[in-house]
Image: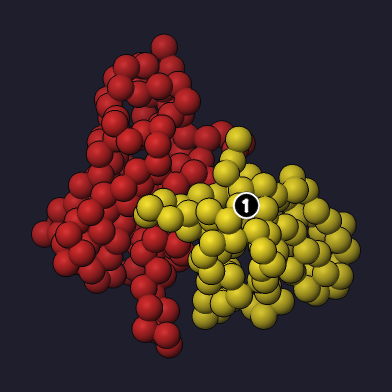
Amino acid sequence: QSALTQPPSASGSPGQSVTISCSGTSRDVGGYNYVSWYQQHPGRAPKLIIYEVIKRPSGVPDRFSGSKSGNTASLTVSGLQAEDEADYYCSSYAGSDILVFGGGTKITVL
Amino acid sequence: EVQLVESGGGLVKPGGSLRLSCAASGINFNSAWMVWVRQAPGKWLEWVGRIKSRASGETTDYVAPVRDRFTISRDDSRNMVYLQMNSLKTEDTAIYFCTTGYIDRSAKTYHGDDAFDLWGQGTMVTVSS
């Protein structure tokens, strides 16, 4: 059982938007603005796409955006493209120098 | 070239030991906080542990299931980080990734504990009799 809860799957057609959630507690997601999101294609290492809840590393398209409300963080992918089909993982700092991940969400582009 | 390359994975029996290595190049290794993340087959990512830089005391922290069995160390002279795994269990079977924190140059902040932007390709560890 992963520490953070994500829906196992989400889907959308090209050009549409899809939003996935990441639910935690006040001890992790709700307690810190240190939520990150990663994109992972099959057989590849994860790629950082969002950090500090809403920030994007350089080179990440602005189609990817993050937000947080209470103990739940969200990732929105706008203008879906075929290459966005991948697994997405959230993570959160959980205090005491520990990091926790979500169970992952597979985004399918229909 | 900026990269992390893991090695040392393989098949080991329950109760056995294995040492993974991660070679870093193209980064300021001395100041990098190095992290190990694992992913069991078909499962999610799991933060295993982290070693801070020498300047930050080389402090190590681990996830609870490995805390008394795994040890992370580093050799700054060789740009290497290691994961010593003892008393291995079948549930330790996973791909082990080496990664390091993201440097936000505009904000002048270092995300050694919460965001990782450079990853190795991973090395597979299989614990089975």
Q: Colour of chain B?
A: red
Q: Which quadrant is the C terminus of chain B positioned in?
A: top left
As drawn, is B118 to the left or to the right of A107? left
Q: Is residue A59 above or below residue A45?
A: below
Res. B105 image quadrant: bottom left
The subunit letter for the residue under badge 1 reads A
Q: Position of residue A98 (x, y in %)?
A: 41, 51
* Residue at image point 28% right, 70% down: B27
As drawn, is B108 to the left or to the right of A101? left
Q: Position of residue B37 (x, y in %)?
A: 43, 47
Residue where numbered disc 1 is placed: A24
Q: Which quadrant is the N terminus of chain B positioned in?
A: bottom left
Say whether residue B67 is visible: yes
Q: Is residue A26 above or below residue B39?
A: below
* Residue at image point 29% right, 31% down: B68
* Residue at image point 70% right, 49% down: A6
Q: In the rendered image, what is the letter of the chain coloured yellow? A: A
Q: Is residue A21 above or below residue B83?
A: below
Secondary element at tag 1: loop
As drawn, is B84 to the left or to the right of A107? left
Q: Position of residue A63 (x, y in %)?
A: 71, 76
**Amino acid type of disc 1?**
Gly
As drawn, is B81 to the left or to the right of A44? left
